[in-house]
Amino acid sequence: MERSLVLIKPDAIQRGLAGTIISRLERRGLRIVAMKMLQMDKALAQRHYGIHKEKPFFNDLVKFITSSPIIASVFEGERAIDIIRQTMGATDPAKAASGSIRGDFGLDVQQNLVHGSDSAENAKKEIELFFRPEEILSYRRDVDRWITS
Ligand code: IDP
Ligand code: MG
């Protein structure tokens, strides 16, 4: 089982696409194990996107991601990280496959609707930035229920 941090970005919330994005991930068989709505502050945004701090788009990206509320979530499933990246589509919506979230609904390389962790190592770090351990549930297949971990 893998877990991935999924952020439904400000543009998706503003456009009323949160439900669509959640639904597409659920329909792949991934399970929600944590979810909250919040507005990221600058410090959290700079940590979450720390890997991009030297990029020319970094300051704009921080401004965008902190501009209005997001939904932060953790999805769980077998190979969840790759499956979510595929369901999201390429970073630039112009290059994203149609049928993917960005390919179907995106237009702008910055305002591209959704974030998903790109590796198990980054997923762990990113999840810890947004959730305390007790906020994350686990899906127990044997009893077909979500439980607190
Ligand atoms: P990813 O979200 O597909 O993993 P990254 O390369 O990690 O893409 O970039 C993080 C975020 O930074 C992107 O989702 C997008 O919002 C923004 N971004 C990436 N490249 C550009 C760019 O060239 N111009 C403006 N914003 C960008
Ligand atoms: Mg990335």
Image (cartoon, rainbow, N blue to C red):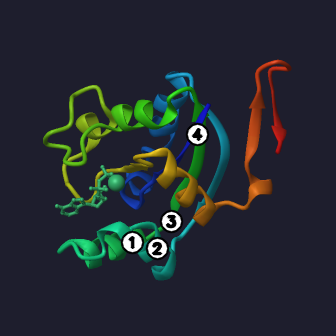
Distance between mark 3 and mark 2 Cα atoms? 17 Å
Q: Is residue 98 above or below residue 121?
A: above
Distance between mark 1 and mark 2 Cα atoms? 5 Å
Task: Identify the residue under disc 2.
Answer: 47
CB under 8 Å between callouts 1 and 3? no
Q: Which mark is residue 69?
A: 3
Q: Earlier in the sequence, mark 3 or mark 2?
A: 2
Q: Mark 1, mark 3: which one is toward the viewer?
A: 1
Q: How many marks?
A: 4
CB under 8 Å between callouts 1 and 4? no
Identify which residue is drawn at 50% across, 65% down. 69
Q: Which mark is residue 75?
A: 4
> SS for tag 3?
loop
Q: Earlier in the sequence, mark 1 or mark 4?
A: 1
Distance between mark 1 and mark 4 Cα atoms? 22 Å
> SS for tag 4?
strand
Query: Which amino acid lies under the numbered mark 3 shown in the image of this protein?
Result: Pro
Could you say where residue 54 lies in the image, as x and y percent from the top left? 24, 76
Query: Which amino acid lies under the numbered mark 2 shown in the image of this protein?
Result: Arg
Distance between mark 3 and mark 4 Cα atoms? 19 Å
Q: Earlier in the sequence, mark 2 or mark 4?
A: 2
**Quadrant position of the C terminus in the picture:** top right
* Closer to the camera in the image, 67 or 73: 73
> SS for tag 1?
helix
Query: Which amino acid lies under the numbered mark 4 shown in the image of this protein?
Result: Phe
Task: Identify the residue under disc 1.
Answer: 50
Q: Earlier in the sequence, mark 3 or mark 4?
A: 3
